[in-house]
Image (cartoon, rainbow, N blue to C red):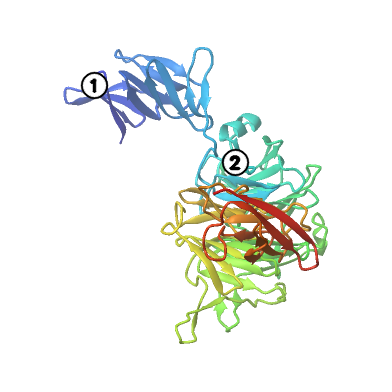
Amino acid sequence: MVAKAVVCYDRLYTLQHDSIYRYVNGTWQLVRPEPFAWIAANEDKLLAYHVQNGLYALDEADQLSGVSNLYQLNNATYSNGEYWLAESSYGLIRLGTGGDDYFHTDGPNSNFGYCMYAAHDQIYSAIGGRWAEQFLRYGRINIYDRNNWRCINEGNIGASVGRPAIDIVSLAIDPNDAGHWFAATYGTGVFEFKDYQAIAHYDSNNSTLRRVNNSVSDAYYTRTDGAMMDAQGNFWVLNATSIGSPLHIRNTYGQWKAINLSSYGEAIEFTTPGGQILIDQRNENRKWMYDQRHTPGVILLDDGGTPFNTSDDRCRKRNQWTDQNGNVLSPSQIMCIAQDMKNRMWIGTGAGILIIPAEVDFMSSNACHRIIIPRNDGTGLGDYLLGSEQVNCMVIDGGNRMWIGTENSGIYLIEDDTITVAHFTTDNSLLPSNTIQSMAIMPTTGELFIGTAKGIASYRSDASAPQEDLTNAYAFPNPVRPNYQGVITIAGLMENTAVNIIDESGNLVCKTRSYGGTAVWDGRIQNGRLATSGVYTALCNEPTGKHTVVKILVIR
């Protein structure tokens, strides 16, 4: 199979079965038998890249000369006496006799966000993938702190712990330390990071984790997912294995414990563990987990407050529910779970959403609720919310609204169970794809980060997490520049804060309320015109009597 063909030295070269061939007098002649990954030609110089030995130049006499063996290269070119390299970890590189020059973009090292999390006023994004098998994506982690991206490449990880992470599928961020987290991978075990650097790797050699079965190797079949850290600093992770335990915990002293799970006497084994262990906000002893396929189901573990003592554990797995109309539902895929501010559990499936009401005891009842959206066509009928759509991810914003990411139809924003506030697709927004893989919300600003099949996007929402007081209320942008025509956000508010905006003469120009900790003004006065230059005052009053004032400068 011909991988690539180039013309150099007035000859045609190809890469066939990893070896370089040259076309001469109607036949192909072997030039170099070494296993090369790619070839390129520029300015009468043929370049060939060997995965283990680096970049070479091939001259007209078919002799190789080494160019660089320091980087993992995707491409290279030679121009005006200089070599330029495209490298996975370092970006664009210019080779120099006195040292190499690196040219980085102000952004992540990849536009692929397979899993995303918000913690410590930062967004953590990782590259990976899996379903029945791993996707074999070299793991990279990107962290956004509202100003800059911090990038951790597979080369950084490999150099630190002796092997690169492949297929990072979930992250567990330490609630007390932004630079400390664990990365679960679907094949290469678990990696630990401290001070934003990889410090340890865990598999069956130094932990209770086990490979899938006895017929495969630890190196590429130690499948983990569902990473989580609790408030006490314990690390939890799920393990897809038939020869070990499905759940593992590591305490702050580095001691591991394998936990066996069973539901009514039937052992629980994960085939494709879900992307998160969720701690119930009503009771931290209760942990929610799920298996996505083959034996799909939602699992609730009550550890009795003693995670390392299983004698008082209670566990229940369910893969069948009965909705409010008596319909029995057995989803073939469980894709995601989420808990809203009303303590309801949302279950995203391969065909719509199930909700477990807060008053339902999951341990003893399989009752669920499905949202019905009225058709408003005079028939009095309705349809189940996303009844046939695969729901890949869900996230709650500060206004207790549910953002729903789907496999084929973009993002839905649902409020009060029946109101579709927004539906974003590639047709009406800047989404690069309608396949949504992950989402995370920056709590302080309400900015939604979206991992799609074709890149990462973000959306400035009008809701954020409510604050405990009004001390840090502020507006942005501020000042409002002449060419700006978007919304003006007042953030740092308490729940249900009334916001009245007046001009310099005391005239009311906007009256609104906060969604969680955010209120927005469209920048227009009551007659619909854009607000003219001046200082506008936002009077913010919370229902219990707390209040503050935010000044907004408008320049036209």
Q: Position of residue 140 (x, y in %)?
A: 57, 39
Q: What's under tag 2, amino acid-wise?
A: Ile
Give me the residue at 50% from left, 72% from top: 387
Q: Position of residue 123 (x, y in %)?
A: 63, 47
Q: Position of residue 243 (x, y in %)?
A: 64, 52
Residue sitting nearer the eye, 355 or 321 = 355
- Check the image and name the residue furthest to the bottom: 379
Q: For residue 280, say whether it is visible.
A: no
Lateral position of residue 29 relative to residue 507, left or right: left
Residue sitting nearer the eye, 281 or 150 = 150
Point out which mark residue 141 bears. 2
Secondary structure at badge 1 equals strand
Residue sitting nearer the eye, 402 or 170 = 402
Q: Which residue is mark 1?
A: 11
Q: What's under tag 1, amino acid-wise?
A: Arg
Lateral position of residue 272 relative to residue 9, left or right: right
Q: Is residue 106 above or below residue 12?
A: below
Give me the residue at 37% from left, 20% from top: 79
Give me the residue at 38% from left, 29% from top: 38
Q: Is residue 139 above or below residue 471?
A: above
Secondary structure at badge 2 equals strand
Residue sitting nearer the eye, 63 or 285 = 285
Q: Position of residue 473 (x, y in %)?
A: 72, 54
Lateral position of residue 305 relative to residue 393, left or right: right
Circle 1 packing at 10 Å, graded few (<14), some (14-19), many (20+), is few
Which marked residue is nearer to the observer: mark 1 or mark 2? 2
**Sooner in the amino-acid sequence: mark 1 or mark 2:** 1
Q: In the rendered picture of this protein, how many numbered marks are placed on residues? A: 2
